[in-house]
Image (cartoon, rainbow, N blue to C red):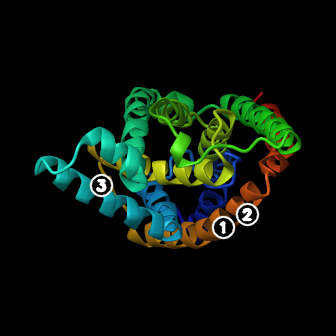
Amino acid sequence: MTSLHAIILGIIQGITEFLPISSSGHLVVFQQLLGLVEPGIAFEISVHLGTLAAVVIFFRKEIIEVNDAAVDGIKSLVAGEADFARLYAENSGFKLAMLLAAGSVPTAIIGIFLQTQSDRLFSSLSLAGAMLIVTGLILVLTGVLLWFTRNATVKGVGMSGFTLGIAIIIGIVQGFAIIPGISRSGSTIATGLLLGLDRRTAGSFSFMLSIPTIVGAAGLQVVMDGFGDANMVPMVIGAVVSFIVGYLSLGILMRILNRGRLYLFAPYCVLAGLVVLILGS
């Protein structure tokens, strides 16, 4: 892999990881177009860690709040100074930490299962194309919902109405987003909106839920495949590029989401899916 390949794939990862157009689907397509059937586990981990850093910095205030609330809450529970039910109901930071933990469990279970099928999943252009179309249809459905709620003056709920069941469902959806062509951000945010969350809550929960997912997936890949003969130069270049582009993309998506225009990406997903299906046939 050359430095140019690393820059190209880093840009693709940075853009598509957060915009609801599927990073895995685009990486499958561009790897094959560039003749990189397998860019290497180490490189894949490096670009994902780059976008992970973008999430951590973008949501640093929320992450610090959740971390502090979780640590303080656990200390209080261990010391017998607090009741879990009351802490969960009255401390939004502690509640969010518990919801993130709950959502991560089904993601991990499904992700481990699908990881065993990764060779087949990531070698099929037809599958990536079909799933891009599915992502487009999900975004269309989300657009219809946002139009309805806006015109019906119905507002989504925030943390106060965020239930454990919603977190688990979003976690399940995120688990299946390992399939190339299904957008992790698009599918999880759309699911949150469809289940009644407001835009900010759905968006921030989706991206904060990606943190343990990316860390866990990277760790699993290292355990299963190791690093191989890793070349540090493209790894560093890919990570830096994916971080910079990812941070900018994340800011763009949150502005689009706050305006209720996530559906704008639907035509692109459908058209890209059709093109990929043609290329894979």
| 117 on left or right of 30 | left
Instruction: Looking at the picture, tell me which residue is in the foreground, 27 or 61.
Output: 61
The residue labelled by disc 1 is 251
The residue labelled by disc 2 is 255
Residue at the image position 58 percent from the left and 48 percent from the top: 158
- N-term-proximal mark, 2 vs 3: 3
Q: How far apart are marks 2 and 3 (CA)?
A: 29 Å
* Disc 2 crowd, CA 10 A, few/some/many (<14, 14-19, 20+): few
Q: How far apart are marks 3 and 1 (CA)?
A: 26 Å
> Looking at the image, is mark 1 or mark 2 nearer the viewer?
2
What residue type is disc 2 on? Arg
The residue labelled by disc 3 is 70
- N-term-proximal mark, 3 vs 1: 3
**Quadrant position of the C terminus in the picture:** top right
Coordinates of residue 193 in the picture (x, y in percent):
67, 40
Residues at badges 3 and 1 in contact (C-beta under 8 Å)? no
Coordinates of residue 15 in the picture (x, y in percent):
66, 60
Instruction: Looking at the picture, tell me which residue is in the foreground, 242 or 135.
Output: 135
Residues at badges 1 and 2 in contact (C-beta under 8 Å)? yes
Displayed quadrant of residue 250: bottom right
Residue at the image position 80 percent from the left and 36 percent from the top: 145
Q: Distance between the residues labelled 1 and 2?
A: 6 Å
